[in-house]
């Protein structure tokens, strides 16, 4: 969408400690494709939708959706991914987005702290980092 921007910090030096956060430091190609797809939707299709993003990584898709008028937007990822995600939210002045630690496969009740604006179910759920199984 013209006139809309999201800035990202990618940090390949992040200490991932050998856990699932290894993939959270950079923008995945699938996130670019998803954002491009979403850019083709009318604002009316997105405005006011509550969004749960699974595996947010550095937060590009969720922040894009927040800029497009989705609210609330809850970004989730593994614990070690959250500092970079918080850094990117601050960089983009998106205090309206909320962050919640939610590792893949966790039951909903295991989320660290339910976001204050959260209501279940969300009207949209996204991921650009869906795991695959063999």
Image: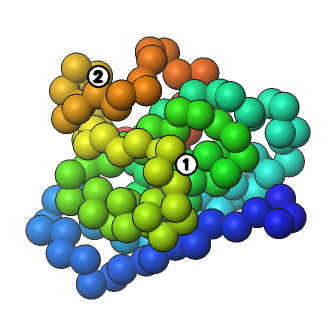
**Residue 27's x, y, as percent?**
51, 68
| Mark 1: secondary structure | helix
In which quadrant of the rendered view does residue 15 lie? Answer: bottom left
Circles 2 and 1: CB distance less than 8 Å? no
Horizontal relation, residue 33 to residue 90: left or right: right
Residue corresponding to mark 1: 62
* Sequence order check, earlier mark of 2 and 1: 1
Residue 99 visible? yes
Q: Residue at x 29, y 22 (%)?
A: 108
| Mark 2: secondary structure | helix
Q: Residue at x 47, y 51 (%)?
A: 95
**Residue 71's x, y, as percent?**
59, 34
**Residue 98's x, y, as percent?**
41, 42
Count neighbours of disc 1 (C-alpha within 10 A) and say few if under 14, some if 14 to 19, many if 20 or more: many
**Residue 59's x, y, as percent?**
48, 57
In which quadrant of the rendered view does residue 76 lie? Answer: top left
Q: Residue at x 83, y 66 (%)?
A: 3
Residue 131 visible? no
Q: Is residue 39 above or below residue 112?
A: below
Q: Residue at x 22, y 32 (%)?
A: 113
Extreme residue toward the left, this view: 17
In which quadrant of the rendered view does residue 44 lie? Answer: top right
Horizontal relation, residue 130 to residue 101: left or right: right
Q: Is residue 80 above or below residue 134?
A: below
Depth check, mark 2 against mark 1: the one in front is 1
Q: How is the image coloured?
A: rainbow
Extreme residue toward the top, this view: 120
Residue corresponding to mark 2: 108
């Amino acid at each position: 969408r013209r006139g809309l921007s999201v800035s990202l910090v990618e940090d390949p030096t992040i200490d991932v400690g050998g856990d699932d956060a290894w993939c959270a430091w950079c923008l995945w190609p699938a996130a670019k494709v998803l954002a491009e797809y979403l850019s083709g939707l009318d604002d009316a299709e997105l405005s006011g939708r509550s969004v749960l993003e699974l595996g947010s990584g550095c937060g590009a898709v969720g922040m894009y959706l927040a800029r497009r008028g989705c609210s609330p937007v809850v970004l989730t990822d593994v614990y070690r991914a959250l500092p970079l995600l918080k850094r990117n939210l601050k960089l983009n002045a998106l205090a309206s987005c909320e962050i919640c630690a939610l590792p893949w496969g966790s039951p909903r009740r295991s989320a660290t702290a339910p976001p204050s604006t959260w209501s279940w179910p969300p009207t949209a759920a996204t991921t650009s980092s869906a795991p695959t199984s063999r």
